[in-house]
Amino acid sequence: MYLISMKEQKTTHSGFTLIEMLVVISIIVLLASLLFPAINSALRRSQQTKCLSNLKNFGIGWNANYLETISGPHENEMDAIFPWLSTMVPDFLDFGNLRCPADESKGRYGSKPEENAEFFAMDKEGFPETDDNSNNPASGQYAQRNEDVEFNSYMYEFNDATISWGWSNYILGSGDHSFATEELVDINGDGRITWGEVKVTQYTYGDTFSMGAYGPSQFPLVRCFHHFKDKVVRVRNLDNPNAPTVTTSVRVMNLAMDGSVFISGLQWEYPLEP
């Protein structure tokens, strides 16, 4: 038997050298940088698809109620309109339909994303009154809302909140551009002007943007503001002569009164530009 001396034994290495580890890490970082944007884009598309499904369900629920009510005896147009999205649950909507997957607050903070500065300006003008969740009662009339619903990601244009912003400037018009009267706006005749009443009037008689009635595919019923991270949109500014004619805005998904969905900027009356 022959014995190998210590000098004749070859040493073997196990594991990675520092250079090999750095190479592997570099490859992983490179692959991640290539994959993450694709994964993020796929996630956002998935969120949009689910949100689109929610909006479609709003349209089905609202039109079912609207068509059923409008075909029978009723006192006025407001009889055919849900006072809050939450009142559609559970007969016309599931609880889950009120939560947009792109809403990082999961519907707890209402329809306006708090992490976007553009929505803070809107909030200062009283827009939180439209948020249909029990955590943010604001200044509206909440007697008719469904108290079992504690979250909602969507803004319902025809809600029953008392309206606080200067709607009369462009809903009523003036002179040759008059569209409606305050008597027409107060549909319920109770002296309280709600979002729903103003929106019915705007849809029926038009405003300074349209100079006539809107079509059911043009007028939003429900809006989702939680896709602002997806991309910006270009819109034509119609009411500020001192601003650039074409400007950028956040991307908003809207359910129209006829059940179709359209994309707009923050102010849906501004037409999109290519």
Image (cartoon, grey):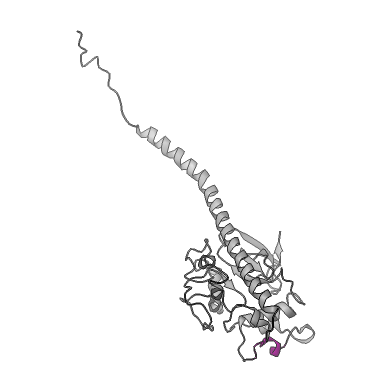
Q: Which region of the structure is painted magenta?
A: 181-189
Answer yes or no: is residue 170 visible: no
For residue 182: magenta?
yes
Image point (48%, 63%), residue name: 104
Residue 178 is one of the magenta-drawn residues:
no
Who is closer to the viewer here, 110 or 238?
110
Quadrant where the image shows the N terminus: top left
Give the x, y percent position of residue 3: 20, 11
In this view, the residue farthest toward the front is 72
Tally of marks: 0
Q: Is residue 155 left or right of residue 202?
A: left
Residue at the image point whose x is 61% and y is 83% from the top: 194
- Horizontal and vertical percent position of residue 21: 38, 35
Can the viewer see residue 100? yes
Image height of 135 relative to 6, above or below: below
Residue 212 place in picture, x, y as percent:
77, 77
